[in-house]
Image (spheres, rainbow, N blue to C red):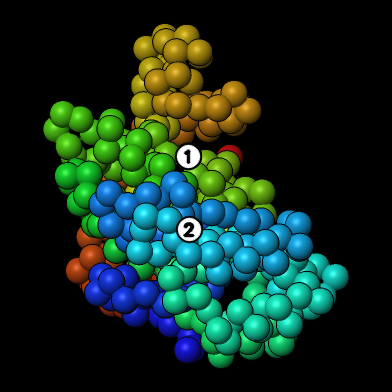
């Protein structure tokens, strides 16, 4: 056998063709673990005794490998096949970090060369160094599937499919805003999508304000984020952070959504304070953490209302310019326009 792509694995499972040995690894554990569950579930037909034929062993105790392979050699009970999951597998660059120890290479190789035809063995690896002998054995005798972190476009597509499954509508700009907020952590993205789909009931529509209000910004960059610097008027730092965000592949439209949300909150806070609303009520309405209240509210007091309205208009114009390629299309044009916008909106403190 050899390396198998995720797409090939998906088609393989759909056609109910089973490899006797799978090795699933990579830095996207959410998709890896989902594939493990899917393989295990599809191995059993309705009415078969799954509880008697599915077992899991952890290599945090390296000697568990021998027990697991012995279980794989047992005949299934009232089912067509047996499923053996072997988790916490680590074949590292340095052998002292291994959980799949080289001393067990011989017993592993013996099974790999002559696997039980009535068992499906799934190795779930946290690390699999390509230069090690055991990894090469896996690639020679097993179906090896790598699960990499998704790129931004893949994340957006994956998130779109989850909203579709939840029968919930979300426009492209808001979807990119969500992905930009959460980042490449699919486990958390899945949780946030479920939360937003629930919050969107009964209308089943997720909008930008809902995302901004319910999803916290967790992609920390050097312990500060772009909107903090914009509020504080730190233009140089804002441009530095912007460069880092854009270099990491963030969507310009999603960034505009974040900046726009921040300035709408400033305008709301300013108007509430001018109307005599108490500080704790303002902080609650505009969703301010305690540590952020003083600098945010101070900036809101100093900000000129007409200036804030002008900035919100410029945000709208920049969003339209990026979407229609006015003033330069493609990534370079979008980047230039958002850099110009950041320079303009980083108000002095």
Could you tell me which residue is drawn at 18 percent across and 39 percent down?
205
Q: Position of residue 309 (x, y in %)?
A: 31, 39
User: Disc 1 marks which residue?
Assistant: 216
Which residue appears farthest toward the left when viewing the image?
203
Instruction: Count up the numbered dots.
Output: 2
Image mark for residue 274: none
**Residue 126 visible in the displayed image:** no
| Secondary structure of residue under mark 1 | loop
| Residue 16, quarter of picture | bottom left
Circle nearer the N terminus (2, 1): 2
Q: CA distance from mark 2 to mark 1?
A: 25 Å
User: Disc 2 marks which residue?
Assistant: 33
| Residue 12, quarter of picture | bottom left
Q: Position of residue 213 (x, y in %)?
A: 38, 33
Which of 313/223 is in front? Answer: 223
Could you tell me which residue is drawn at 32 percent across and 52 percent down?
48
């Amino acid at each position: 056998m050899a390396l198998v792509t995720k797409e090939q694995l998906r088609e393989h499972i759909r056609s109910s063709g089973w490899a006797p040995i799978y090795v699933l690894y990579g830095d996207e554990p959410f998709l890896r673990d989902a594939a493990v569950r899917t393989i295990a579930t599809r191995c059993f037909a309705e009415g078969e005794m799954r509880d008697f034929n599915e077992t899991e062993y952890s290599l945090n105790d390296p000697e568990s490998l021998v027990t697991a392979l012995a279980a794989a050699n047992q005949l299934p009970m009232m089912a067509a096949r047996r499923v053996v999951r072997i988790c916490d597998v680590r074949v590292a660059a340095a052998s002292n970090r291994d959980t799949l120890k080289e001393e067990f290479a011989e017993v592993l190789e013996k099974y790999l060369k002559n696997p039980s035809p009535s068992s499906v063995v799934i190795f779930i690896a946290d690390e699999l160094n390509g230069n090690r002998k055991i990894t090469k054995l896996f690639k020679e005798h097993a179906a090896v599937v790598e699960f990499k972190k998704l790129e931004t476009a893949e994340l957006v597509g994956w998130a779109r499919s989850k909203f579709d499954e939840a029968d919930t509508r979300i426009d492209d700009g808001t979807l990119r805003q969500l992905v930009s907020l959460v980042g490449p952590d699919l486990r958390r993205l899945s949780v946030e999508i479920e939360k937003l789909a629930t919050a969107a009931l009964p209308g089943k529509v997720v909008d930008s304000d809902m995302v901004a209000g319910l999803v916290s910004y967790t992609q920390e960059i050097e312990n500060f984020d772009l909107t903090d610097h914009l509020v504080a008027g730190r233009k140089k730092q804002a441009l530095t952070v912007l460069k880092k965000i854009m270099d990491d592949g963030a969507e310009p439209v999603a960034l505009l959504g974040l900046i726009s949300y921040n300035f709408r909150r400033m305008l709301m806070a300013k108007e509430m304070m001018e109307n005599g609303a108490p500080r704790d009520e303002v902080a609650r309405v505009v969703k301010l953490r305690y540590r952020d209240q003083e600098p945010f509210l101070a900036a809101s007091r100093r900000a000129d209302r007409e200036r804030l309205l002008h900035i919100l208009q410029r945000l709208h114009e920049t969003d339209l310019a990026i979407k229609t390629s006015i003033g330069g299309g493609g990534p370079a044009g979008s980047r230039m326009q958002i850099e110009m916008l950041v320079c303009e909106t980083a108000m002095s403190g």
